[in-house]
Every structure is written in structure tokens, then in C-alpha cells.
Image (spheres, rainbow, N blue to C red):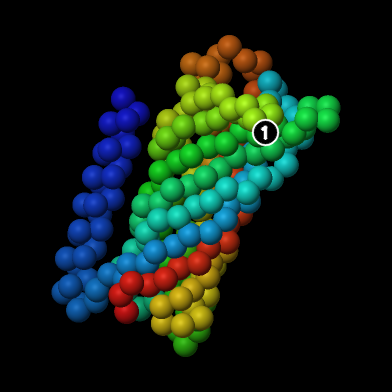
Amino acid sequence: MKHYLFALLISLTASFFFQLDAFAQKKSNKASLSLGGGVNLSSARVGGYYNQASNATSRVAFGFFADKKIQGGLSARTGFFYNGLGREHGIGELNKQEEFSYFTIPLQAKYSFRDSPFSLYAGPQFSYLIHATWKPTSNTRSLVTDQFQRVNVSVAGGLLCAFTNRFSMGFEYQNSIGSSLDEVYKTSLPADTKYQLYAFSLRGFYKLSK
């Protein structure tokens, strides 16, 4: 069922962007498409069964992003990208990791300041879990995908700085809404168990169209 939900989100995103395109064409504005990628410094807020001190771990994020001007400095922002998240924690002298691989679709509002290279954006994003792995050692990896929700909803916001007409850099914060744990799996764990992913990101963007 959750697979179909994510497919529906993709369809709604395409429909949403098509409607914005039709609206923008009436005002002679075109969408700008960018390729972007960078590093997520990710961790998790945990409790109960997962109550170990969490450290940040670096994962990559990359994909494409599209901005559609609506009016003045206001634009709509969406895209489709690979989003790597996770956390590191220690048990004794061992460092263990959980790693998550998502496909993510943002649906955000963006505001560009007049005569300034800076812009702000914020809004929800919808992610589909490709797989989750647990690494008890550097040479051992186990799949734990069924312990986490396939569809994850988060909020994200960031600051963009355009250095040229085509190249920009951005700093972003994203945070899952509620627990990332699968509801059925969670019933077998202590009541105070939680697992909530978040990340700080640094990304570069190259605009394919002016």
C-alpha cells in the first residue's frame, strides 16, 4: 500500500508542477531546472530500545531540482533526488551505523530577495525508503528495511546563495515528522522507543537553463 502511496505522490508532484507550468506560461515565465548534490551530515533522535548516544554520519544526496516563478520573488520548488541519511553510535569500543537510502520529492515555497544573491525556501518533502542497513562492523552489513516506514514525511528549509547565473550553493536542515519506525515493528519494542532522523546539508547546484 505504501508503495502505491509514493507512486501517487510522484503523480501529484508531476500534476502540481504541470499546473504551475501552465500558470507561469501565461505570465511568460519558464521553469529553471538544476542538477544538485552534496553531503548530508545526518543523525537521529532516539529513545527506548535505540537509546544510545547518536553521532552524525556523512551521506551523499544528489538529483535534480526545479523552480517555477509564481509572482515577484515567490517561486515553487520541487525535484527528485537520492537522499542518504543515517546515524552512528558506539557500544563499548565499537562504532555501529544505521544507513538509510531514500528517494525524496520536495514540495516547497522559495522566496528570492530583490537585488540579492540570497533566497530562502521551506516546506514538506516526501521520501520513499529504498533500503535501510545496519553495520555492526565495518565489514558486516544487514538489511533492516522492514523495521522502518517505507514512506517518510519530513520538513526542510534552507538558504541558497547564487554565485553566478548558473552556480549556487545551499545550506539545508531537514527533520522527519514523527517516528521513522514501522508501526508493526514498534509494537514489539518498549513504549518509549523512538527514532527520528534529521540532517544538515551542504549542496551545490548547477542551473541547466537560465
Image point (68%, 21%), residue name: 49
Residue 173 visible (yes or no): no
Location of residue 169 with respect to 83 vertically, above or below: below
Task: Name the spot of residue 169 as percent of width and height, x first.
Answer: 53, 70
Location of residue 17 with respect to 54 vertically, above or below: below
Task: Name the spot of residue 141 as percent of width and height, x first.
Answer: 59, 27
Image point (61%, 33%), residue name: 98
Which of the two residues, 58 or 80, is positioned nearer the viewer here? 58
Location of residue 151 with respect to 155 vertically, above or below: above
Left or right relative to 9: residue 140: right
Instruction: Count residues near mark 1 (Cα–Cα under 10 Å), then give few for <14, some for 14-19, many for 20+.
Output: few
Name which quarter of the figure residue 110 lies in: bottom left
Which of the two residues, 141 or 19, is positioned nearer the viewer here? 141
Q: Amino acid at mark 1?
A: Ser
Residue bearing the label numbered 1: 138
Left or right relative to 210: residue 155: right
Residue 90 visible (yes or no): yes
Identity of the residue furthest to the front in this view: 139
Mark 1 element type = loop
